[in-house]
Amino acid sequence: MPRYYFNIMDGRPLVDREGMDLPDAAAARKEATRYAIDLVRRSEFSGWKEVENVVVTDEQGAEVLTVTFPKSAAERCGT
């Protein structure tokens, strides 16, 4: 099963060093979306920019997909 890494890109990259084994890129997209929603709800990051990204990479470091979530999403979640 491939391993995917979920990196936060908000002007200061936070690199996922552990990753997660998932069956395919579709499952990685679902996990990245869930992760982005969780980050917004917890308001873990200060100094929000207009757009934040979760960049998913594979075991070789190649970018597989990006989930972008706007600052307005954080506001809608009450953060």
Image (cartoon, rainbow, N blue to C red):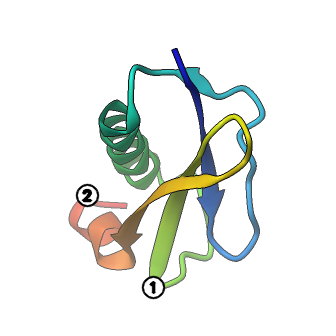
Mark 1: few/some/many CA within 10 Å (<14, 14-19, 20+): few
Side of 58 relative to 12 (left or right): left
**Which residue carries the number 2 mark?**
77
Q: Position of residue 21 (x, y in %)?
A: 54, 18
Identify which amino acid the numbered label 1 is placed on: Glu
Q: Quadrant of the C terminus?
A: bottom left
Q: In terms of sequence position, does the residue under pointer 2 or pointer 1 come before the other?
A: 1
**In this view, which residue lies farthest toward the bottom?**
50
Tag shown at residue 42: none
**Which residue carries the number 1 mark?**
50
Mark 2: few/some/many CA within 10 Å (<14, 14-19, 20+): few
75 or 6: nearer the viewer: 6
Q: Position of residue 28 (x, y in %)?
A: 41, 36
CA separation in Å, label 2 and label 1: 15 Å
Label 1, secondary structure: give it: loop
Q: At 38% across and 29% down in the image, what residue appears?
A: 24
Q: Is residue 44 above or below residue 31?
A: below
Q: Position of residue 29 (x, y in %)?
A: 35, 43
Q: Position of residue 20 (x, y in %)?
A: 57, 23
Q: Quadrant of residue 74?
A: bottom left
Observer-side mark, 2 or 1, equals 1
Identify which amino acid the numbered label 2 is placed on: Cys
**In this view, which residue lies farthest toward the top?**
1
5 or 9: nearer the viewer: 5
**In this view, which residue lies farthest toward the left?**
76
Q: At 54% across and 75% down in the image, what residue appears?
A: 48
Label 2, secondary structure: give it: loop
Q: Is residue 68 above or below residue 18?
A: below
